[in-house]
Amino acid sequence: MRIALDAMGGDSGAPPLVKGAVMAVKRVDCEVLLVGDEEIIRQNLAACRCKSRRISVVPCSEVVGMCESPAESLKKTDSSISVAARLVREGKADALVSAGNTGCSLAHSLKNWGRLKGIKRPGIAHLMPTPRHPCLVLDLGAVVDCKPQHLLDFAIMGSVYSESILGRKRPTVGLLNNGEERSKGNALTLATYELLEHSHLNFVGNVEGGGIFEGDVDVVVCDGFTGNVVLKACEGAARMIMTGLKGVMKRNVFSLASALVLSPGMRKFKKRIDASEYGGAPLLGLNGICIISHGSSNARAVMNAIRVAGESVASGVNAHIIDELRVISEEIKIHEQAQVS
Amino acid sequence: MRIALDAMGGDSGAPPLVKGAVMAVKRVDCEVLLVGDEEIIRQNLAACRCKSRRISVVPCSEVVGMCESPAESLKKTDSSISVAARLVREGKADALVSAGNTGCSLAHSLKNWGRLKGIKRPGIAHLMPTPRHPCLVLDLGAVVDCKPQHLLDFAIMGSVYSESILGRKRPTVGLLNNGEERSKGNALTLATYELLEHSHLNFVGNVEGGGIFEGDVDVVVCDGFTGNVVLKACEGAARMIMTGLKGVMKRNVFSLASALVLSPGMRKFKKRIDASEYGGAPLLGLNGICIISHGSSNARAVMNAIRVAGESVASGVNAHIIDELRVISEEIKIHEQAQVS
């Protein structure tokens, strides 16, 4: 298994990425192709004292920034993300891992590999923490004006990924909505409900915003506008709470001492709700495997993303998605014909 | 100033509501009409040892539950919320406060009072906590399929309310979006951006989900579907974090002792991020004043909601909204004519 890693993406540049690759080749059965500025990568490899033959460097001259627009970034054909996606297209790598700009990773993957047969629009998935298993939410911004068919595709892809990679048996699928009752929703979710209930997916109905974090549902689907706003709002709320708590702990010497006592538990808790521990989030619906690691990923998170990329290839997740699409589109067709007659 | 209080709404029934009313007549220049089951209300008044002449009881026989559908609830014409809204319509009260089901409060207010002239659809607003001033977000579920004009109306109403009641000077207004750049958005937000930028509102552009909690913008507008999902998702994320922290604090005797040291600061922090302290949230666009207090409101929150209801009447917030609507619809018309010619 050969994984192409965009070694220039992410908030902290090459160091955690190279370190993650070094960890990965030790613990996971894979080779890693580090794509980026050769000198920087070699320096970082030297710092890790890594001489593994399972790591190689693919040099390139450009970098796509974290704030660049996907359309603009496509012009950078010698950027690390572009070259990494090309390696997969040419069969020189089996999957792509990037901690860079998600929109640009999607754009370059789509340009190089195209969509999976039957998928109208690929989606960006993300693992949200819950007290139990993480909840896979999609789409997070790839398709901002969705049709019901897009949401059905997201549900199929999310369900297959949850089963193949996250190990959930017959994953439950919920539809993000402004109320749990069947009658609730906007025009999009009302129409999507009908499609979902006539598929054989394990559809459990509408899920309110808070339901994402309760751990009762494995996959939650929504349009990319809502998903993006919800993800960023929750991150913002969590940041505000954590900053406020830090303030409480820094009030005086007693509170500082108390914080010290609590810090091992706090670290453990923070790690548990840190989705990057789960191994990155997939771009689903592409004719290839691309796993996105958070921009702030540490080496461990990068290693996990590489592991998940390998598992995605090995499990044939994309072939399963195509099969499931075929079956469910038949089911929907039969339901629609029954309604007409 | 006479405020009709739905004394049966809310998660804990009459006790915090009656107590809040008693607090209000002591501290705020107002009378309160407690609407609900007379016996229960009188028992609670007796428990508060309240004999104030500024509190009166308006008996009724029905109650609308927290989970009832607005349409169904309209049949209960002798319910506390229905009678309270009627008191305002008949001029026997100046404003309505409810801690009950928001959708039902909106339905009864709308049925009894109608809309403000020029407003197509009323909106539900909510105050979100930030490290600085709270941020007024609307709509939170009244209009799930919005047109750009609805979002413009929300912006106008939110801006006037923020200035008149929350004391912000020339409040900043942001459009909730999946990116800050002007080019970002779905069909709705792209079209709304154009309307907002050609009004004289202090429009600061797109705001991402996290921007709600940063304190840089006074009013954030969105469609009711997105607003509802975002509010509930953030509440869910906060609940998960707080539960997790409680777990950390209960690990052993040392962590319990540390938690004890931190508890005064924690209480203060929790109070700061508890929006009910700000005095409830308005339903905007109705031809009358209705302030919604959270279902779990304590007496202090109810008192604050009564205070805000009184201030809303005294400041003539609805008249200001009508004026502002007139001016801004002229501005938009001029812009549209300029585009045609």
Image: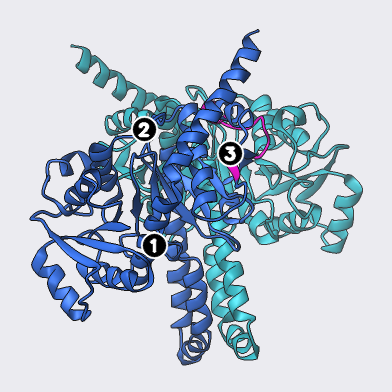
Chain colours: A blue, B cyan
Q: Nearer the viewer, mark 1 or mark 2?
A: 1
Q: CA distance from mark 3 to mark 1?
A: 36 Å
Q: Is residue B335 left or right of residue A250?
A: left
Report the quarter where the C terminus of chain A lies.
top right
Q: Chain of mark 2?
A: B
| Amino acid of disc 1 | Arg
Which residue is denoted by mark 2 in the rendering? B186
Q: Which residues are magenta?
A: A172-189
Q: Is residue B109 left or right of residue A81?
A: right
Q: Are marks 3 and 1 on the same chain?
A: yes
- The quarter of the picture where residue A225 lies is top left
A40 inside magenta stretch: no
Q: CA distance from mark 3 to mark 2?
A: 19 Å
Residue B276 versus residue A251 in the image, above or below: above
| Amino acid of disc 3 | Asn
Viewer-proximal residue among B72 and A193: A193
Marks 1/2 in contact by CB < 8 Å: the verdict is no
Which residue is denoted by mark 1 in the rendering? A307
- The quarter of the picture where residue B19 lies is bottom right
Q: Earlier in the sequence, mark 3 or mark 1?
A: 3
Decide: few, some or many residues near mark 3? Use Cα within 10 Å; few <14, some 14-19, many ≥20.
Answer: many
Give the label on residue A178, or none. Answer: 3
| Amino acid of disc 2 | Asn
Label 2 sits on a secondary structure element that is: loop
Q: Find residue B135 and report its horizontal and vertical position in percent.
A: 44, 51
Residue B164 appears in the figure: no
Marks 3/2 in contact by CB < 8 Å: the verdict is no
Q: Find residue B203 and report its horizontal and vertical position in percent.
A: 31, 40
